Amino acid sequence: MPKFVTIGYGDAAGYEGTDAAVRDAAHAHDAHLRERGVEMGIAGRPVQVRNHDAAGVSAQEGPFMRSELPVAGFAVIEAETMEEAVALASRTPCAVAHGVVEVWPLNDAV
């Protein structure tokens, strides 16, 4: 089955401004996804890794990507189609609590 990486963006203000019943339903949806075997977690502090021309590793704290909202979490989900993956992501906390979720198809490496 095809896999998709989801990246959830959101902040405390959007989360706290969302009706508690909507948030609770989103967390129940996440629990259901975990029961289906979805790997998900809350984002920690990132490190950028470089090894240009395999000549030496450098690591720098902080994100490479920039966005209006902070990265809140990640998941790897399985779905038959992008439309199904979008439907699954649309009910997660970041999507319903004034954030956004990106859904990326995870293609086979060449």
Image: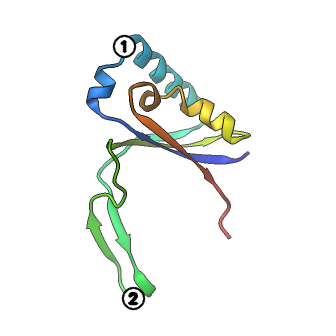
Label 1: which residue?
A: 19
Residue drawn where x is 35% and y is 48% of the image: 67
Secondary structure under tag 1 reads loop
Q: Quadrant of the N terminus?
A: top right
* Percent x, y of residue 22: 43, 15
Q: Is residue 7 left or right of residue 17?
A: right
Mark 1 closeness class: few <14, some 14–19, many ≥20 residues within 10 Å: few
Q: Quadrant of the C terminus?
A: bottom right
1 or 2: mark nearer the eye: 1
Above or below, 3 against 58 in this view is above
| Amino acid found under the numbered disc labelled 2 | Ala
Q: Position of residue 19 (x, y in %)?
A: 37, 13
User: What is the quadrant of residue 8 in the picture?
Assistant: top left
Which residue reaches farthest top?
Answer: 21
Instruction: Judge whether 41 appears above or below 59 on screen.
Output: above
Q: Earlier in the sequence, mark 1 or mark 2?
A: 1
Would residue 36 be visible to someone looking at this image?
no
Query: Can you see residue 62?
Result: yes
Q: Secondary structure at mark 2?
A: loop
- Give the percent coordinates (x, y) of residue 29: 53, 23
Q: Quadrant of residue 14?
A: top left
- Left of 69 or right of it: where is 82? right
Which residue type does callout 1 highlight?
Asp
Which residue was labeled with disc 2? 55
Across and down, in percent, residue 68 comes to 32, 44
The residue that appears at 32% across and 57% down in the rendered structure is: 63
Question: Are the residues flagged by discs 1 and 2 in contact, CB closer than 8 Å?
Answer: no
